[in-house]
Image (spheres, rainbow, N blue to C red):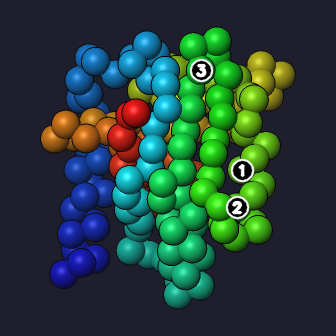
């Protein structure tokens, strides 16, 4: 039953392209806290499920900070697994927002902002950050 619900949620997220107009660069500026993490795929191996469970725990209460000057900072909670510390390379990188696609791109001009790409989705008044290269969906709350 749980995997069925997760499958339905994933379908709803990917089909629901219509997003409220209040999601724009100005509303993204500020500090966002991860309050819940969903894994959107049922096709993961046992090892992949364990790996993503570890990542989910590491992301809870982490903070994504989009500065008005175009800089990005990620504050992960203490005690995260060592492999998650690689996300520190995102700090002090530039960010830009494509309003048409509702896509946050993080990186540098020289790498085409390709360090991290996050789709922003809004559903039932909640904001979700969806990574383009993992099955993780982060439910966010703005400070």
Mark seen at residue 87:
1
Quarter of the figure that contains the N terminus: bottom left
Percent position (x, y) of residue 86?
77, 55
Against 21, is 32 above or below?
Answer: below
Q: Indicate which label's residue lies in the foreground, 3 or 1.
A: 3
User: Gap between marks 2 and 1, in whole Å?
Assistant: 6 Å
Residue at numbered disc 3? 67
Query: Residue at horizontal 74%, vertical 28%?
Result: 93
Percent position (x, y) of residue 2?
24, 78
- Tell me, yes or no, whether the two marked residues, 3 and 1, touch with CB atoms within 8 Å: no
- Tell me, yes or no, whether the two marked residues, 2 and 1, touch with CB atoms within 8 Å: yes
The number of discs equals 3
Residue at numbered disc 2? 84
Query: Residue at horizontal 29%, vertical 47%?
Result: 13
Judged from the image, the secondary structure of the residue bearing numbered disc 3 is loop
Percent position (x, y) of residue 63?
54, 43
| Residue 42 in which image quadrant | bottom left
Query: Residue at horizontal 60%, vertical 29%?
Result: 105
Give the left or right position of residue 120, taking residue 1 as reference: right
Q: Residues within 10 Å of mark 3 (few under 14, many from 20)?
A: some
Against 118, is 37 above or below?
Answer: below
Give the left or right position of residue 142, taking residue 13 as reference: right
Work out which residue is located at the far right of the displayed protein and give it.
110
User: Gap between marks 3 and 2, in whole Å?
Assistant: 22 Å
């Amino acid at each position: 039953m749980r995997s069925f619900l997760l499958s339905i949620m994933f379908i709803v997220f990917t089909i629901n392209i219509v997003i409220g107009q209040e999601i724009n660069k100005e509303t993204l500026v500020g500090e966002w806290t991860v309050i819940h993490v969903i894994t959107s795929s049922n096709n993961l191996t046992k090892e992949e499920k364990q790996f993503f469970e570890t990542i989910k725990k590491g992301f809870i209460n982490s903070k994504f900070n989009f500065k008005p000057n175009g800089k990005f900072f990620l504050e992960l909670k203490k005690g995260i697994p060592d492999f998650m510390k690689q996300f520190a390379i995102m700090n002090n990188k530039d960010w830009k927002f494509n309003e048409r696609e509702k896509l946050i791109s993080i990186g540098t001009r020289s790498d085409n902002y390709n360090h991290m790409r996050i789709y922003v989705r809004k559903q039932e008044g909640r904001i979700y950050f969806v990574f383009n290269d993992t099955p993780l969906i982060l439910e966010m709350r703005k400070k």
